[in-house]
Amino acid sequence: METVLITGGTGMVGRYLTRYLLQKGYAVNWLSRKAGETSVGGNESQENKNQGNKSQENKSQEKKVRVFQWDIDRQTIDEEAIISADYIIHLAGAGVAEQRWTSKRKQEILDSRTKSSALIVKALKEIPNTVKTVVSASAIGWYGPDKQDSKNPFTEEMPSYPGFLGDTCKAWEESIMPVTTFDKRLVRLRIGIVLSGTGGAITEFKKPLKAGILPIFGTGKQIISWIHIYDLCNLFLYAIENREMQGVYNAVAPNPESSRGLMMSLAQTMGRKWALPIPVPAFLLKLLLGEMSIEILKSATVSSRKIEAAGFKFTYPVIDEALANL
């Protein structure tokens, strides 16, 4: 049985991905501040149930995950975590949308990504290991705002956009690049807005809809490049198992949707067909969220052509199907 070592395993994507990999027959270990052992989901996620994984064993049996300790600030790591790993999936990083972007918070967001990458690089250099592949998260924050032109979406070869998220994504990707000098295959996934049934954007979007309010952020025309959590987990697995993949790929569904279209589709899915549309003007978002409002108001049409050309098939390519599943 091959072993996948995940950083950032306690986050939303990390927990979904852990369950998914366990169901696919991999052993999974985590890196965290405290060592030990944890149980991951005796019950499958609804998303995976709908894929036909309905065995009674997976529904009832708790799966164990070994947790190894690392200290990003001190640049220390339990050597056994590296020695036992066949693959590393690097998700660690402070949440971008969890707090207002003060100068201190911006530095935390940057350091949590680059310093954790530096520790992985250091460990792979100094500790004897048989790690074949490193798959590192990045984000479509790499790209700047577009002109809502679906004929010219952002593609992987485009330069990073000057600004906080663009600069952060560039530094993030650069910080993990040295693993390629150790003969490790490296895949970087620029992840779009992740849609899941628990946590993330959908949870926040549902709150006003439950009260019968359909918020329209800014003009509502800005394009959101999204991905269903099941497709994202499957994409991480595909990056591990497809030896031809290397370099950077956009992890977004083939059919991006406008902010207004996503909210209206979600309202219909929730049975809130008569929710009252309420415009939330840009100035109010800026007042409430500060600089972070830029990302809510930004339009980013991002291409999935490269990952599709690599043979990956999306289970949820359109927003209505994705939301209905969630």
Image (tube, grey):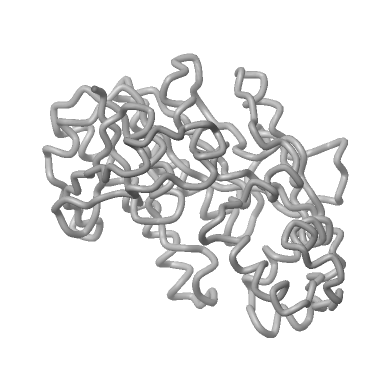
Q: Is residue 257 above or below residue 203?
A: above
Q: Quadrant of residue 183?
A: top left
Image quarter in which the N terminus is found: top left
Occupied quadrant, residue 64: top left
- In the image, 32 versus 54, the foreground residue is 54
174 vs 302, nearest the viewer: 302
Residue found farthest to the top: 244
Residue sitting at 61 percent across and 61 percent down?
201
Q: Is residue 205 above or below residue 13?
A: below
Furthest toward the front, the residue is: 56
Left or right: residue 276 versus residue 111 is: right
Which one is nearer the viewer's eye here, 46 or 291? 46
The x and y percentages for residue 84 are: 17, 31
Q: Position of residue 317 (x, y in %)?
A: 71, 36
Q: Residue at x 47, y 49 (%)?
A: 171
What percent of the width, then of the height, locates residue 112? 37, 58
Give left or right: position of 235 versus 70.
right
Count every numbered label the image shows and give the total.
0
Task: Give me the residue at 32% from left, 27% from top.
Answer: 25
Picture residue at 18% right of the left edge, 26% below the top:
129
Residue 68 picture location, percent across and down: 17, 48
Q: Is residue 299 above or below residue 178?
A: below
